[in-house]
Amino acid sequence: MKFSPAYQTPTVERIRVRYGETDMMGHAYYANYYYWFEQARGAYCRDRGFTYLQLEQQGYKLPVVESHANYRAEVLYDDLIEIRVWISEMKRASMRFDYEVYNVTRDLITTTGYTWHVMVGEAKKATSIPQQVKDWLLREPALTASIEH
């Protein structure tokens, strides 16, 4: 199943870039984008009424098996950014999260990217995504109470 942000409401996670997240030139260090992507995925789950921890308590994990980031413009110390995240594709045992980094301070999309995840069970082997988990992942945020942590 392929999706688009027009199909699914993206989650938006706001982040103020900290000094320690920049390099010697004051630019956001490239690897930090993956931390921001991870933070946005957690917010995505909470917006849909569950936490990643609850998924693990059900015996499932979603390790990243592929990642990509396309850096188009700079993000600097103290910039306010929004990480927009949505599921763009779901297969039997895997899913792809897509991301846009929108720099509010500079009013432009600075980075796009994606991560592919495989559903694994207790045996740490790929398993079909259970219907309950699909329902959690694909429900609209407006249909559930967001979890604040």
Image (spheres, rainbow, N blue to C red):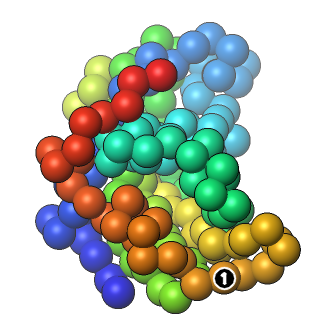
Residue 25 falls in which quadrant of the image? Answer: top right
Amino acid on which the number 1 mark rests in the picture? Thr
Q: Nearer the viewer, residue 103 or 66?
A: 66
Identify the residue shown where x is 40% and y is 39%.
Answer: 46
Q: Position of residue 120 (x, y in %)?
A: 71, 72
Extreme residue toward the right, this view: 123
Q: Nearer the viewer, residue 75 or 45?
A: 45
Could you say whether the residue bearing mark 1 is in a helix, strand or loop? loop
Identify the residue shown where x is 30% and y is 21%.
Answer: 105
- Taking the image as shown, residue 4 lies to the left or right of residue 25, namely left
Q: Position of residue 23 (x, y in %)?
A: 70, 24
Question: Looking at the figure, which quarter contains the N terminus?
Answer: bottom left
Q: Position of residue 52 (x, y in %)?
A: 56, 46
Identify the residue shown where x is 46% and y is 12%.
Answer: 78
Identify the residue shown where x is 66% and y is 50%.
Answer: 57
Q: Is residue 55 visible?
A: yes
Q: Nearer the viewer, residue 59 or 19?
A: 59
Q: Position of residue 20 (x, y in %)?
A: 69, 15
Q: How many marks?
A: 1
Tag 1: Cα neighbours inside 10 Å, few (<14), some, or many (≥20)?
some
Q: Which residue is mark 1?
A: 127
Using the image, determine if residue 16 lies above or below residue 47: above
Q: Is residue 33 visible?
A: no
Using the image, determine if residue 44 lies above or below residue 22: below
